[in-house]
Image: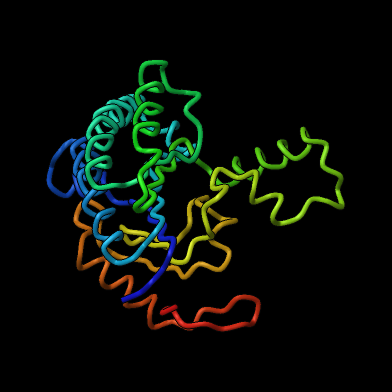
Amino acid sequence: MSRAAHVAIIMDGNGRWADARGLPRAMGHRKGVERIHPVAVSCAARGVQYLTLYAFSTENWQRPRAEVAALLRLLGTMIDDEAQTCLRDNIRLRLLGSLDRLDLALRRKVESAIALNSANTGITLSLAFDYGSRAELTRAARSLAAQNVAPEDVSEDAVSRNLFTAGIPDVDLLIRCGGELRLSNYLLWQSAYAELYFSDVLWPDFGEAGLDAAFAAYASRSRRFGGLATTGER
């Protein structure tokens, strides 16, 4: 079985899943949320140490207002459930991105859930919320400028320390569900040498079989880092 330390997933296809069944798109997002914890537990069982999920992008604010409102309500429900199930299953919960656009009550709810699970020692489940890689890199550049870092001292390590993912290793395996073949402004810096796996399965249907296929593909590849090769099993 693959030993990818850091797996990132673009959870695509919730709306299409609902449309195909004649259901409201909000129901597709709800079904998608229900997949998060089982997938996290399955990844932990496979030896994954970090799982990062693209929950809500900076561009998602441009969706219809009703859909955005439904997504935010769902976040509130999900974070309550995850706070307790993560505590039960020793999963450390982390957020990548910004909470600034959330109302105060929801922001405090998210912060409380993260604090509750901060001492857990199992897999780290990071939810990328109001996240976009270009915005993240812009923020890192501004942070370095605010620290008065001299141009000659701006290194890759310095940039990495100022990203939302500081302290998390680069992505080994990036999975995108839903049949689309793009990265959608997700973890561009962190995925520079990631193995990419694209699945036609819509996220609400993604489970053990999908993970097995992705990890099998990862294990079969010879990874290359600037010309140096290593196998997926490491």
Q: Is residue 46 above or below residue 102?
A: below
| Residue lying at 31% horizontally and 76% vertically, measured from the top left | 1
Q: Which quadrant is home to the C terminus?
A: bottom left
| Residue lying at 53% horizontally and 58% vertically, measured from the top left | 169
Query: What is the count of numbered marks?
Result: 0
Compare residues 222 and 202 and report the one nearer the observer: 222
Compare residues 67 and 143 and report the one nearer the observer: 143
Compare residues 13 and 121 and report the one nearer the observer: 121
Q: Is residue 234 left or right of residue 80?
A: right
Q: Is residue 197 above or below residue 23?
A: below
Q: Is residue 206 above or below residue 118?
A: below
Give the x, y percent position of residue 20. 17, 49
Give the x, y percent position of residue 82. 26, 38
Compare residues 82 and 74 and report the one nearer the observer: 82
| Residue lying at 79% horizontally and 51% vertically, measured from the top left | 154
Give the x, y percent position of residue 60. 42, 36
| Residue lying at 32% horizontally and 47% vertically, measured from the top left | 91
Q: Is residue 159 left or right of residue 21?
A: right
Give the x, y percent position of residue 81. 22, 34
